[in-house]
Image (cartoon, rainbow, N blue to C red):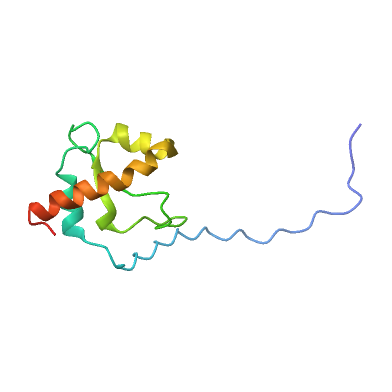
Amino acid sequence: MTLNRKTPLKARAELKAKTPMKRRAKRKPRAGDNRSYLDWVKTQPCVICQRPADDPHHIIGAGLSGMGMTAPDLLAMPVCREHHNEIHESPDLWARQFEWVVRTIAKAVSAGEL
């Protein structure tokens, strides 16, 4: 048994070539952005375990950032990858971030970075 269409198939329009993804616009500088300070933070040991820090962690959960935004660079602290992940996964550690940021800023001031 074969199936027969009651209406003919419509001719399809040619498919358009996909346009390449647009590059995201460069983020505008904000108050509190300080690239040289952020570079200095990257050279410091982890504030939790004193091992070499892989990347700076910007404070979270304090109302200083929104969806898709990070807090200003002046509110960054050095952490190793293990503790960076742990901070993001555990809101219990968010309250301690203030202590770590203050210690990092104090160290930067005494080192002449700020």
Q: In the figure, residue 63 lies in which quadrant?
A: bottom left
Question: Residue 13, image x and y in percent?
Answer: 67, 61
* Along the viewing direction, whichever of 64 and 4 lies nearer the viewer: 64
Residue furthest toward the left?
Answer: 111
* Along the viewing direction, whichever of 10 and 40 lies nearer the viewer: 40
Q: Relative to 25, does residue 62 appear above or below in the rendering?
A: above
Query: How many discs appear?
Result: 0
Q: Is residue 54 toward the left or the right of residue 1 in the image?
A: left
Question: Residue 27, image x and y in percent?
Answer: 34, 64
Point 42% across, 37% down: residue = 92
Quarter of the C terminus within the rendering: bottom left
Q: In the figure, residue 50 lies in which quadrant?
A: top left
Q: Is residue 92 toward the left or the right of residue 72 in the image?
A: right
Point 43% across, 62% down: residue = 22
Q: Is residue 4 toward the left or the right of residue 58 in the image?
A: right
Point 40% across, 62% down: residue = 24
- Does the rendering let one see residue 57? no
Q: In the figure, residue 113 lies in which quadrant?
A: bottom left
* Along the viewing direction, whichever of 6 and 65 lies nearer the viewer: 65
Question: Residue 112, image x and y in percent?
Answer: 7, 57
Q: Relative to 74, does residue 45 appear above or below in the rendering?
A: above
Point 61% across, 58% down: residue = 15
- Does the rendering let one see residue 76? yes
Question: Residue 110, image x and y in percent?
Answer: 9, 52
* Along the viewing direction, whichever of 95 and 76 lies nearer the viewer: 95
Quarter of the N terminus within the rendering: top right
